[in-house]
Amino acid sequence: MIDLKTRIGSLTLKNPIILASGTCGYGDAYKDFYSPKNLGAVVTKGISLKPRVGNPPPRLWEVECGLINSVGLENIGLERFIKEKLPELRKSGAEIVVNIFGEREREYYQIAERLSEEQGICALELNLSCPNVKKGGLEFGKDPKTIEKITREVKKRTNLPVWVKLSLSRAEPSPLARAGEEAGADALVITNTLKAMAVDLERKKPALPAITGGLSGPAIKPVALAGVWEVVQAVRIPVIACGGIFSGRDALEFLLLGARAVQMGTAVLVDPLAPMRALEEIKRYFREQGISSLKDWVGKIDLNEQV
């Protein structure tokens, strides 16, 4: 048996594969393909205090080796999520992480307080880095002082573990990561999508009505690898990798750098079974390499000079 358990602060996940926010609905989008309890955790799409209609369509635009999305954080709002979605998620047996965001700082605090009253949630993920909304999002995540303030205030209002999701779009990640750590974050998620744009040449217009959006997929994997590496060196709290992870081998690269877990997002839009295939690929690789435990792999990158 191969032990794939991983610790994220006070949480122990059965394996390091997590469904990323925004790509698995409210954590239930792929229940017809497999049970979400088979994965380490699922992260819901971003939940706001009030319902949001999001950006006008089209919201997705395929580019070379990736996808630009401009969904605009459409969601049903906090109270409907608690009433309509959370009960079914609890029944699934999955580890549930709720991604939250606000247009104003105080909205993060209100959402955190309300969700802390509910059972069955294992962590909150603070979206401080979404590049496809005009209010909040990346504006909060580009300033270390704001990251520290929001994280600290959320921590005061909840007993749940708090993950801070950051982007590599606008700044070197280390100061932002350290700000989250100093404020008490239990883990950091690196990276959110990167700010991007596409042009529809025939129409002579931006491809997306919102003009810019967030780039994800294989195109950003090298950037994400570098960012995860830098953050792992800069902080002591766990780092969760996200960005262009499509296979078990992709996941193994991030884990080798020191990430404790990985989130898969765009991959499941291409193949809903991608997380399960990645999990089996990791197990197969470990068997071939004679590795019996994930802890014998995480952070074991060889930095010795090549002869």
Image (cartoon, rainbow, N blue to C red):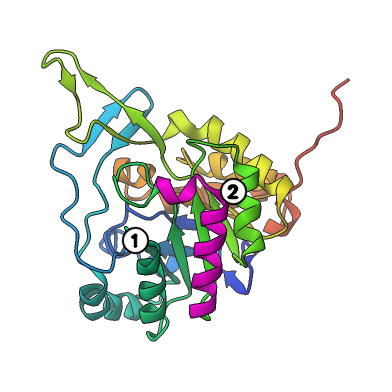
Name of the residue lying farthest toward the left: 203
Percent of width and height locating residue 283: 59, 52
Q: Is residue 132 above or below residue 296?
A: above
| Quadrant of the snapshot with the N terminus | bottom right
Of the pair 261 and 106, the residue shown nearer to us: 106
Magenta span main SS: helix
Type of the residue with mark 1: Gly
For image coordinates 69% across by 48% down, the residue present is 232
Q: In this view, does 226 lie above or below 82?
A: above
Residue at mark 1: 102
For image coordinates 53% across by 56% down, the residue present is 147
Percent of width and height locating residue 3: 65, 64
Q: Is residue 160 above or below residue 32?
A: below
Percent of width and height locating residue 235: 71, 53
The label number, if any, that marks residue 176 in the structure image: 2
Q: Are marks 1 and 2 in contact (CB under 8 Å)?
A: no
Disc 1 versus disc 2: distance between alpha carbons?
Answer: 19 Å
Mark 2 surroundings within 10 Å by alpha-carbon count, few (fewer than 14), some (14 through 19), many (20 or more): many
Mark 1 surroundings within 10 Å by alpha-carbon count, few (fewer than 14), some (14 through 19), many (20 or more): many
